Image (cartoon, rainbow, N blue to C red):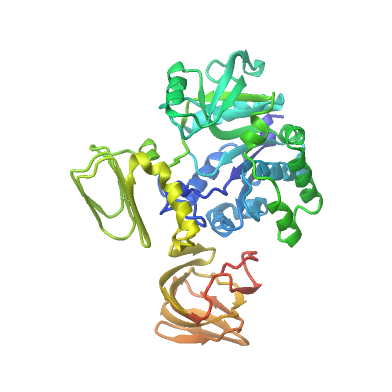
Amino acid sequence: MSPLSHLYAVVLAGGSGTRFWPMSRERFPKQLLSLIGEETLIQQTIRRILRLIPPAHVWVVTNLLQADSIKLQLHEWKDEMLDHILVEPEGRNTAPAIGWAALRLQEQDPDALMLVLPADHVIQGARKFRAAVSTASRLAQAGYLVTFGIKPTRPETGYGYIQPNLRARCRETAGRDDLPGYKVARFIEKPPLSRAKRYVQSGRYYWNSGMFLWKVSSILEELAQYQPRLFRSLQALARDGSAMTNTESFTRCYRNLPSLSIDYAVMERSSRAAVVPVDFGWSDVGSWASLPEVMAPDRQGNVITGNVVQVDSANSIVFAEKRLIGVIGLSEMVVVDTPDATLVCPKSRSQDVKRLVEMLKLRGAPQQLEHVTVCRPWGAYTVLEEGEGYKVKRITVSPGKRLSLQLHHHRSEHWVVIQGVARVTRGDEVFDLHAGESTWIPRQTAHRLENPGPTMLEIIEVQNGAYLGEDDIVRYQDDYGRHSAAR
């Protein structure tokens, strides 16, 4: 039987993508953006994997803040993947996420090979990608922990590097000069520019892509050896009930796990680490300045998207959503406009966007958490206006969809139908409203909004109350299996 028959993919989809603010937010990270083409980065990642394995072999690890959005992104494959979305109560870096997924995979297939992929990378060259996975699978079957090394194109200080032991070629790749495998001599953390230049000039170092392939049994053995505390804690979580992830006990235990990257926890320590150098197009799209790697610039070197008018600008990045943005004489700049926030910075400082987001978080600014338009499994809502004691939203509900049956302790709501037909549950009443009609939902009254028609339902909702947070929701029934405070 081919090793690929035991191949599973684990997609890590819990990152915050802070360097892509203001388009990415904590609840709407980079993997949910459609930067290249119409599909989002996570959808492109899943589709790439499905050329190798069936949807039932794909698992996704995300966190509680992003789970609803991720499930919405994966709707096309929901029947095969719904039970394979692992939701961390809180992100604890890649080692706990990978260890938890490995234990779950081991329950399903003790001989499983585990391909670990970030959800937000851009890969160009599907055939070369599949060939690299095939080579790495042979090494993984032999017990290696395989990472994919990217040939550097510049002295990048934002990536880790891998130095292969060129005298220790893995015999499983004998005769494959196109895709050799080598034991790893050492991993190097993000270096200063002077050292990165030396690495690139030598031609003997590779970028650490953050993509891995190994046997589930191999990674669990190494976790047990090098991170025994983490391994025992993960075993206890799995033993106490893998499906009971909504309990307070699971949440508390998971949040107490050490926050460790898989590189630091295992790869930098293991004698079983191997690297397969690859030459397919790859980018982690780590900042706004990296967009020209994956999007073709115009003749002046600009990457421009949206409603933009530019005069005499060069080597700049300008993103606009709805508003018209005019730029004149820009050089080496980044301008990104969204409905509630605008970023302007030199391309050379685009890595510092993360620092700006940290400042917003300390201030409790909502602009770092989510957009004014928030997608939900049933549609979306947009915050139009808010102030002391009130909030105004535009809510759209897709045909045949409905919100959860819920109530609010601290607010009442007034609904006005703009288009479509709204089926309203209010206490014991069920009735339909048409365009121009309205109703009122008193505080502490169970209610539901539903779209029974064939066209989009759009309503304006006016909330009144002392507290208007999204966590003021008591949910009684939900079509999408949600338990958190998200409509």
| 302 relative to 375, above or below | above
Q: Position of residue 366 (x, y in %)?
A: 46, 63
- The quadrant in which residue 64 appears is bottom right
**Which quadrant is the C terminus positioned in?**
bottom right
Say which of 310 and 354 sits in front.
Answer: 354
Q: How many marks?
A: 0
Q: Position of residue 203 (x, y in %)?
A: 46, 18
* Residue 39 visible in the snapshot: no
Say which of 223 and 215 sits in front.
Answer: 223
Residue at the location (27% across, 37% down)?
301
Say which of 310 and 478 sits in front.
Answer: 310
| 192 relative to 92, above or below | above
Q: Position of residue 3 (x, y in %)?
A: 68, 30
Q: Position of residue 147 (x, y in %)?
A: 59, 29
Residue at the location (50% across, 18% down)?
204
Residue at the location (45% across, 41% down)?
286
| 443 relative to 47, above or below | below
Residue at the location (66% across, 41% down)?
95
Left or right of residue 363: residue 309 = left
- The quadrant in which residue 458 appears is bottom left
Left or right of residue 471: residue 254 = right
Left or right of residue 127: residue 90 = right
